[in-house]
Image (spheres, rainbow, N blue to C red):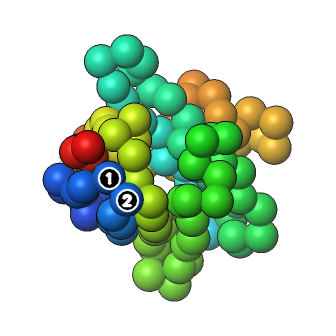
């Protein structure tokens, strides 16, 4: 059984930084694309960032480009989202998702099969 667990969220002031970690058990993570989505009152699952199986390709939400960095350590079965220069609009519950996605489908939440419960990020102004 797959278990996906996120950690690292919290309350941070605008302009600060946070590091989110996604850990998967029950799967060899190196076979899977891993993405971060964000849940807010306005949107159930908004794509934030994705990383390919070997980490050679990354994609970001346009507003996250240049501020967030997604990386992975397949030996440790973890994926990390480094968030810097955070803004109040980055607030939300960040969910980690894993799946065998096609290259063009990475921002579609339905392309992912396993999800964590999320970790809350709150950015104060």
Residue 122 in which image quadrant: top left
Out of 105 and 10, give the one closest to the viewer.
10
Q: Residues within 10 Å of mark 1 (few under 14, many from 20)?
A: some
Distance of mark 1 from mark 2, alpha carbons?
Answer: 4 Å
Residue 116 in the image: x percent, y percent?
A: 33, 45
Mark seen at residue 14: 1
Residue 114 in the image: x percent, y percent?
A: 44, 42
Out of 53 and 57, give the one closest to the viewer.
57
Looking at the image, residue 17 sits to the left or right of residue 47; the answer is left
Give the residue furthest to the bottom.
75
* Residue topped by disc 2: 15
Residue 125 in which image quadrant: top left
Give the residue furthest to the front.
125
CB atoms at circles 1 and 2 under 8 Å apart? yes
SS assignment at label 2:
loop
SS assignment at label 1:
loop
Q: Which residue corresponds to the image point at 82% horizontal and 36% vertical from the top-left?
A: 104
Looking at the image, residue 15 sits to the left or right of residue 53; the answer is left
Residue 83 in the image: x percent, y percent?
A: 44, 61
Q: Which residue corresponds to the image point at 44% horizontal and 81% vertical from the top-left?
A: 76
Give the residue furthest to the top.
42
Q: Residues within 10 Å of mark 2 (few under 14, many from 20)?
A: some
Query: Do we see residue 99 in this rendering?
Result: no
Query: Do we see residue 37 in this rendering?
Result: yes
Out of 42 and 97, give the one closest to the viewer.
42
Mark seen at residue 49: none
């Amino acid at each position: 059984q797959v278990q996906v667990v996120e950690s690292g969220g919290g309350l941070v002031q605008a302009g600060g930084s946070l590091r989110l970690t996604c850990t998967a058990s029950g799967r060899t993570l190196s076979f899977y694309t891993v993405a971060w989505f964000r849940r807010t009152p306005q949107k159930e699952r908004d794509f934030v960032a994705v990383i390919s199986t070997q980490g050679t390709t990354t994609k970001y939400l346009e507003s996250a480009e240049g501020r967030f960095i997604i990386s992975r350590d397949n030996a440790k079965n973890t994926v990390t989202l480094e968030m810097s220069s955070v803004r109040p609009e980055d607030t939300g519950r960040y969910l980690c998702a894993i799946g065998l996605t096609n290259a063009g489908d990475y921002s579609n939440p339905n392309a992912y099969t396993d999800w964590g419960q999320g970790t809350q990020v709150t950015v104060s102004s």
